[in-house]
Amino acid sequence: MRLEKYLVQCGVASRKKIKAAIAEGRVTVNGKIEVNDATDVEWDEDIITFDGFVPEKKQLKYYIMYKIAGYITAMEDENKKTVADLLPENINRSSVFPVGRLDKDTEGLLLFTSDGDLSHAMAHPDRNMEKTYYVELDKDISLEDISALENGVVLDTNYTALPGKVEYLSSKSIHLTITEGKYHQVKKMLKAVKNKVVYLKRVKFGNLTLDGMIPGEVKEIKREDIHI
């Protein structure tokens, strides 16, 4: 198998970080530095090191977090609180990472895993993975606004967002489902219809839901619970 996939299955880091580590010469194969992430290697035949240690194939883990506001989606930061700070002590923080991201002030469902293949698949644009947000608004939303969101609005970056799905909840609250993940996308989509998001929570990612979880809670799930 590819060297990159081998290390992904060891759960040493995300696919992106593994590619960077290989390119930086931090990986060896049978005692020699290897900078080609496509090099063919085999379990029990080749000796691989990553930053000087020999990683082993790990049991892949999957967790759902009900993220609370005030934490950035990163595993480490010198100056800011990160979602890693919300993980229970029994979870090995060095082997899991978040799939996608939520803004600092956004709450809701965040998936963590050590499965790099799954992370890559769920984040790939071709998958059109649906993400549903509960949105509270500053002003009443009109039928014309809803129609615009469902037909694709032009963001302030001149990018035309793909059509969203809107479930009307009240004059100032909706469920908005999108398949993209542009920076501040939900906020920018509502800005495009001259409204403002005052509260944002992701309630669904693919088939996964918060399912009665309380803010800050983390629960382990199985791979078969994730439909992709």
Image (cartoon, grey):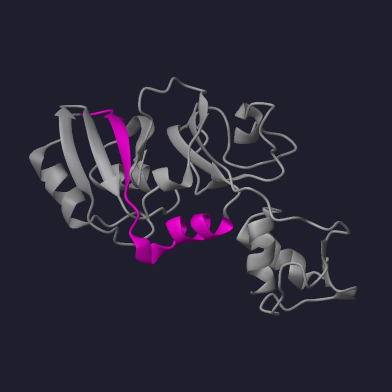
What residue is at 15 percent from the left and 43 percent from the top? 146
Question: Which quarter shows the C terminus?
Answer: bottom left
Q: Is residue 138 magenta?
A: yes
Residue positioned most to the left: 143
Q: Is residue 210 above or below residue 183?
A: above
- Nearest the viewer among 154 and 86 is 86
Query: Start and end of the magenta stretch?
Result: 116-139
Examine the image and state in which quarter residue 61 appears. top right
Residue 131 belongs to the span the image colors magenta: yes
Q: Position of residue 142 (x, y in %)?
A: 12, 37
Q: Is residue 80 visible?
A: yes
Q: Is residue 219 above or below residue 76?
A: above
Q: Residue at x 72, y 75 (%)?
A: 41
Identify the residue shown where x is 39% and y is 58%: 157
Left or right: 3 as drawn, with respect to 172: right
Kindly indicate the quadrant of the structure image that contains residue 129.
bottom left
Is residue 184 visible to the viewer in this orientation of the structure? no
In which quadrant will I find the N terminus? bottom right
Residue at the (72%, 34%) spot, across then down: 79
User: How many numbered circles are shown?
Assistant: 0
Q: Can you give x and y, in whole percent of width and height, for residue 27 in the image?
A: 81, 67
Report whether 102 appears left or right of 22.
left
Closest to the observer, 109 or 41: 41
